[in-house]
Amino acid sequence: MEKIKRALEELWGMNNAYSLSNETVEKLMQETETAKVCTPIIGKFSSGKSALLNTLLGYSRKILREDITPETAVPAEIAYNPEGDNICVVQNDGTCKEISASEYRELHVDANAVRCTRLNLRNRFFGEIPDVMLVDMPGFESGFEVHNRAIDNYLPLSLAYIITFPADDMIVRSSVGNILKELCLHDMPVCVVITKFDKRNDDFEKTFDALKENLNRFIGGREVTYCTTSSYSGDAEELEEFLRGIQERSQEILAKKFRNAVLSAADATENYLRTTLKSSEMSESELDEQKERFGKQLEELNSRFAKEKADFDLQISECAEEMKADVQMALEAEEPSFIAMALNNQSINDRMNMVVRNAVTVSVKKRFVPKVEKYLKRVANCMNGEAVGDVHISFNFNTEDVGNSVVSTTVAAVAAIIVAGPLIGGIIAGLITYVNKIRGDKKREEMKNQIRMRLNAEVYPKVLREVGHGIETAITKQIKLVNTSIEDEITAQRAALEKAMEDVHKKMNDEKERREALAMDMRADLERIQRIRSEISCIVGRADDENEFSLGNI
């Protein structure tokens, strides 16, 4: 990151010297100053998450409340601020309200109106991990809206997730198990923290082994870091060491995030310099020819890019249908679970949310991301190396980052449909009501058949219709954002090249004007010389007359 920051400072200086736009560079400089690697802490209510963070903070008076209810639970983002403590409440519309630490300790918020709270603190331990932001997530009993936020809002910026289990309750509940499954789909490292270690019983080791076995059912034998902590004794050394490890990797992670953006900014500056140097050696007519050739080449480049866009757009609808089919297969595979839950008078919303999320995640990775990668490579091939004189229109995109963004955004959009869709929610609620209505009149097997028919006739079609539309809308929006970035790249580099030639033209015009001014000065000087000569001639004439008179007298 130090290299990234130095590069941006140098680019800013160069752009400023040549009167080039610094808008992109200044935006990147601001982002690098505040960029953090997120590490969400998740678990059930009363699992000791807030107490654990209070222990890490080490204040004599606790700053995070430990008696939060589902109705008032919102994510709390905690990071280091060398300038001093700053706490704010972020509303859903993005507005922030600053409050004091004492006000925060007594804070009650409406989880439906507040997005999160942000605590930027000048704290000893957080000073050791200045590039890490810990996020105290609400307990998962709050519903799958919290699950969605934990993944969709923080996964793209995270290096690891911390899962908490209290030593006196190490049961892997389905809410945590579901998020573990999804984290594994994204290859996200997991750290399991056993809180309240002072409350462990005599069978702790046996229960701990059982916890590991249960976790393996969800994460499939992946490597997991385990830590034990006790807020009572103030012991969190193992977790502190884990977080220091994240800090060590954070510079690499953040630098990777900014690398391509800095390269793109550097390309525009470099193209300006190269074009200026090359063009300054040309005559005005040669420069005009290059400018015309440059315009034609850019038109051809835009034409090829437009063709690639059009070809790729044709694949979106087909790909969305394939992904919808994958979701349908996943729903049908889970049908026995849906039926069993309905028979037991349980809501299937949470289960359906997870089935759809996981199916979309796998399907986007399998079907759409490879197409995006091929598309970006084709675009890069039609741009990279496109010569305009001695410069090149370049293209810097990290296909892995784009792929991850497409996955996370598409899943988030689809999950929002499952959460907020009134039609889907109404059908599922109606299904439970229907089961209750026929419970006393039908035999169990017949009830199963009726539920199955209702699922296939009403629930799945409406879910798939909404989800299919959500998938196509989301991936179309993502590709539009990618294309906009490409167009901005072309525009920025084109502007730099055009400015270079305009500056050379201006220099030529300046020289021409200087020559004309010099000629005018020379003509004026000739006239002046004539006057001087005339004046000198007159002076010489009088002197000659005087000399003649004197000689004559002699």
Image: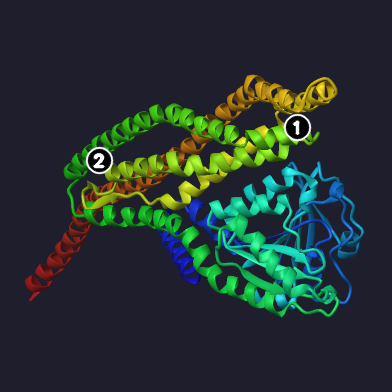
Give the structural element (helix, strand or loop) at label 2. helix
Q: Which image quadrant is residue 533 in?
A: bottom left
* Amino acid type indicated by mark 2: Phe
Q: Is residue 412 visible?
A: no
Q: How is the image coloured?
A: rainbow
Q: Is residue 162 above or below residue 447?
A: below
Q: Is residue 329 above or below residue 5?
A: above
> What residue sits 81% from the left and 21% below the top?
438
Residue 267, percent from left and from top = 36, 55
> What residue sits 54% from the left and 60% below the top?
29
Give the structural element (helix, strand or loop) at label 1. helix
Instruction: Tell me how far mark 2 sits from mark 1, CA to CA.
Output: 67 Å
Residue 329, percent from left and from top = 53, 33
Which is nearer the N-term, disc 2 or disc 1? 2
Total marks shown come to 2
Instruction: Say which residue label 2 marks.
Output: 294
> What residue sits 89% from the left and 73% below the top?
61
Q: Nearer the viewer, residue 90 or 374?
A: 374
Q: Which image quadrant is residue 332 in?
A: top right
The answer to whether 471 appears left or right of 503 in the picture is right
Mark 1 Cα shell of 10 Å, populated few (<14), some (14-19), many (≥20): many
Residue 553, percent from left and from top = 9, 73
Instruction: Say which residue label 1 marks.
Output: 342
Q: Which mark is residue 439?
A: none
Q: Nearer the viewer, residue 100 or 160?
A: 160
Q: Nearer the viewer, residue 28 or 13?
A: 28
Q: Nearer the viewer, residue 444 or 425?
A: 444
Look at discs 2 and 1 and give the one toward the viewer.
Answer: 1
The answer to whether 251 appears left or right of 423 in the picture is left
Mark 2 Cα shell of 10 Å, populated few (<14), some (14-19), many (≥20): some
